[in-house]
Amino acid sequence: SRERYLSVRVSGIGDGLFALFITDVSERRHFEEMRREFMTNVAHELKTPAGAISLLAETISDASDDPDAVRYFSGRVSKESARLTELVQKLIDLQKMQDAGHGLQPKRLSALAVARAAIDANRVQADRRHIDLVLAYGGTQLGLEPAGDDPDVWIECDENAIVTAVKNLVENAIHYSPEHTTVRVVVSEDAGNVHIRVIDQGIGIPEASIGHIFERFYRVDPARSRQTGGTGLGLAITKHCVEDCGGTISVWSHESEGSTFTIELPCAGDAGSVANASSAND
Ligand code: ADP
């Protein structure tokens, strides 16, 4: 239903005849609009913390004889610069993802090892918020450290991409949940597919927003998100990562009941050699 844009060129082809060349440039125009919108968003997102830092620096210099005020405002400078760094890092990640191919190295991986790596990367943050991180295979809870009798669940994809995806989902689950709740990472297999679910008991996502959360810079509540950190880029990156792995991502959520994000990937079967299996766990 998008408008179409045509480029028309008239060219003489001899004998007093002219040819009319009509090219559909809608795609190019649309891409150009998206790029412009993205750049506007980036500029806005960078300007906010940068502006805050410069204001805070002025406040600090005005309050130089009040050590408590200096300490307080310095703390806020650190927070804003951390936000700036996170934003720049996520923009770099996103850019990398968009370079076709970007050096993906698909290999055979244990889905449980991926889940554990994603949990591990979020342990400190979860502890800080008194959130329990739980790993399960189907209905069976597993330890956070690898064990000899772990079930073999194999996927084939780029390790960095899939770990980044699950890590981002766990990070969000913690971020959008009240303290003293549980975040579950559940691995299961069904009809030749592996599912990695990240289930939280958090604030949930309003129905009207669910269709937008994978868009770059989309945030359900920008004010809240800005306060608590967050860039609106995490899920866009996650979706890229999952698709790079040949998988899909979906979400179920109800406000104040929590959210479940499901990554579905083709199962890599269990025909691999022992050598492959152990190297995937490294
Ligand atoms: P952000 O950096 O703001 O978390 P994301 O792209 O990761 O950006 O997520 C986009 C938006 O989706 C978030 O701002 C938040 O409103 C919503 N969201 C993502 N994950 C969850 C979750 N587990 N629970 C509730 N809301 C979520």
Image (tube, helix red, strand yellow):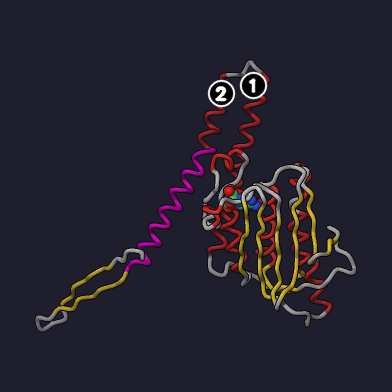
| Residue at the disc numbered 2 | 59
Instruction: Point out the image quarter for the C terminus.
Output: bottom right
Residue 231 magenta: no
Q: What span is in magenta? A: 25-49
Q: Nearer the viewer, residue 178 or 74?
A: 178
Q: Nearer the viewer, residue 23 or 282?
A: 23
Give the SS element for disc 2: helix
Contact between marks 2 and 1 (CB within 8 A): the answer is: yes
Hey, which quadrant is residue 247 in on the image?
bottom right
The answer to whether residue 125 shows anywhere in this view is: yes
Name the outermost residue toward the right: 148
Give the SS element for disc 1: helix
Question: Label 1 neighbourhood size at 10 Å, few (<14), some (14-19), many (20+)?
Answer: some
Say whether mark 1 is within 8 Å of ligand 1.
no
Pinpoint residue 37: horizontal percent, then vertical percent: 42, 52
Q: Is residue 63 above or below residue 180?
A: above
Name the outermost residue toward the left: 16
Hey, which quadrant is residue 64 in on the image?
top right
Q: Main secondary structure of the magenta part?
A: helix
| Residue at the disc numbered 1 | 69
Pinpoint residue 3: horizontal percent, then vertical percent: 32, 64
Pinpoint residue 177: horizontal percent, then vertical percent: 69, 46
Pinpoint residue 7: horizontal percent, then vertical percent: 26, 68
Residue type pointed to by label 2:
Thr
Residue type pointed to by label 1:
Ala
Disc ID at residue 77:
none
Point 77% across, 50% down: residue: 123
